[in-house]
Image (cartoon, coloured by chain):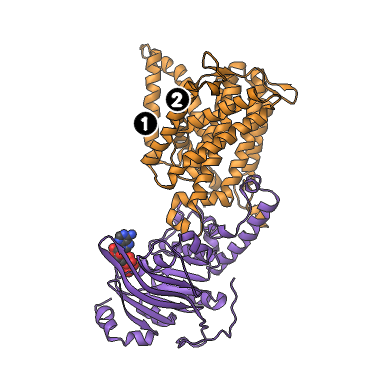
Chain colours: A purple, B orange
Amino acid sequence: MNMTDTNSSSTAAASAPGRRQGEVILDLQNISLRFGGVKALTDISFNIREHEVRAIIGPNGAGKSSMLNVINGVYHPQEGRIMFRGEERKKMEPHVAAQQGIARTFQNIALFKGMSVLDNIMTGRNLRMKCNIFQQALWLGPALREEIAHREKVEEIVDFLEIQHIRKTPVGALPYGLQKRVDLGRALAMEPQILLLDEPMAGMNVEEKQDMCRFILDISDQFGTTIVLIEHDMGVVMDISDRVVVLDYGKKIGDGTPHEVRNNQDVINAYLGSGH
Amino acid sequence: MFYRENGQFKTSYAADQEIFTITQDKWFVWGLIAFAALAVPMLVDEYMFRAILIPFLVLSLAALGVNLLVGYCGQITLGAGAFMAIGAYAAYNFMVRIDGMPLIVAMLLGGVSAAAFGIVFGIPSLRVRGLYLAVATLAAQFLCDWAFLRIGWFTNNSSSGSVSVAKLEVLGWIIDSPVEKYLFCLAFVVLFAFIAKNLTRAAIGRQWMAIRDMDVAAEVIGIRPMFAKLSAFAVSSFFVGVAGALWGFVHLGSWEPAAFSVDRSFQLLFMVIIGGMGSVMGSFFGAAFIVILPIFLNQFLPFLGSLFGVTVSTAGVSHAEFIIFGSLIIFFLIVEPHGLARLWSIAKQKLRLWPFPH
Ligand SMILES: Nc1ncnc2c1ncn2[C@@H]1O[C@H](COP(=O)(O)OP(=O)(O)O)[C@@H](O)[C@H]1O
Ligand SMILES: [Mg+2]
């Protein structure tokens, strides 16, 4: 996995003590996105630093998922610039974002229903599998070795997420909480630099949420992966994120440490106050 | 020996990734192949080879090709007949135009030609799906029907419009008896079935299924839809093209464009639906079912009629055939999209637990 040096200069105010926070890896500048007449995002700017856990919060329909879709190339904003590692990113398709090391999970689980848990996670390795179609057809030598090498990697992820017992189950047959975990596993299999998580704990019970929190923190600590997290549970957000950006009706209304955001009057009015 | 995986512990990932993870399955398949190659030739008569076994094998191969595209990659096609035709006519042209062209090479080149056209006719799948894609592939069918009928070059300007292959010979082995033709087809089918099994459990197969199940998520993890779809069209058409060459050269001997009409395309699609989408085994079930059902009904319905004092005409039998196919297809589409293969695996699941349910 992408190893990181623990001494990387930390210029931002690190809220979670000990968490590594590096340079700006992704800088979103004046992003606007419209669907016909609907303004999903209006003139939004914020940045994401290497190794941090960056939360995006806001009421339903605020534009959070759309923001993730902009980051990994599913949606193309009409205005604004995206700087990736200091360079302006051109309009790109999602698979190019994947090649750059951006992975994501989905709000409404988007697993490959007809495939087993292992196969779902194995698809996350596809960019790293180099054997051609003829080698795969014969399933000898290189193709077999490659398959086994990646299978070992996938088994590590299976162990990490504690889903050994369901590895051969078709994902369609799994309960919701476990599907969410497999979705995370598939994204992790890409060994991403940036991991986008769209409401990974929605609809889970307390115990499942605790497990998921633990996985997210472990990913951050062990692999140094930069994490962008959409979450509704304010307790969770306050606990595990370094910085929070708040969206409301497609506009940014707050940005800062969890502590700063919680005390921001606009945020209280628009979001925290309205009973979410 | 009971049929189960208990007590069969895998000590390496390689063992865990074998084609057949339950030992009995492995023996079953090898046993079946040995039976088909060694025992069948001694047991059945010429009629059986010509009317049932050879068509069954060749159509299984074609259905397998269609299944790779429809069942594994989730793209619809109504043009499979056209790709059989391309395989057959291309192989024919390689044979008659190049002196000393070996039979097997010509047939494989027929498959390669079909694959090339498969890629071209697969391009619409990058923009459209479902009904629109079905119509686009149907256009391929009509284009080929027309071309092979009207463009003399393809048939080597044969005056009757029908073409034939003089002699089938592989390295001195002259394939002329029904048994030999059967064994020749069997060798192709076994080889291609293993290739299909390998592809579907390898990275490329996972890409196809990912595109089928959730294309947005597939793209987000780095799968290029264009590569996944067009490779499925290419591989599928290659299988179908080789099957077409076998159908023309080995089963028919001489043929006209009507041998590969749109009826054939529908028939292959029905095999996949009835046999089981996304299952190699299912392609064989589907082909067996569709080859055997008409023969069975021809025998059985008049017999059934005579019990009740009714005479069942040949037309009546063929009507019954349509009705049965129609209802089965609706049944499988609605109730069991995984077809006969699924019923088979449910039976195995039961067997796995038998006789101790827990
Ligand atoms: N593909 C789309 N087509 C049309 N409108 C969309 C699309 N995606 C999102 N929207 C609209 O953009 C707005 C923001 O949606 P979304 O990003 O899903 O919000 P959130 O994730 O914060 O709940 C909503 O009004 C939604 O209807
Ligand atoms: Mg959302």
Q: Which image quadrant for residue B241?
A: top right
B167 relative position to A234: left or right: right
Residue that carries the numbered disc 1 in the rendered image = B327
B188 relative position to A182: left or right: right
The answer to which of B13 and B271 lies nearer the viewer is: B271
Residue that carries the numbered disc 2 in the rendered image = B146
Residue that protrudes farthest toward the right in the picture: B172
All told, the count of numbered labels is 2
**Badge 2 and badge 1 both on one subunit:** yes
| Residue A60 coordinates in the image, percent (x, y) | 29, 69
Identify the chain of the residue marked 1, using the numbered disc in the image.
B
Q: Cβ–Cβ below 8 Å for labels 2 and 1?
A: no
Q: Residues within 10 Å of mark 1 (few under 14, many from 20)?
A: few
| Residue B326 coordinates in the image, percent (x, y) | 37, 30
Q: Which image quadrant for residue A148?
A: bottom right
Mark 2 or 1 closer to N-term? 2
Q: Residue at x 61, y 59 (%)?
A: A151
Q: Which image quadrant for residue B141?
A: top left
Q: Nearer the viewer, mark 2 or mark 1?
A: 2
Q: Residue at x 49, y 59 (%)?
A: A95
The answer to which of A46 and B66 lies nearer the viewer is: A46
Disc 1, SS = helix
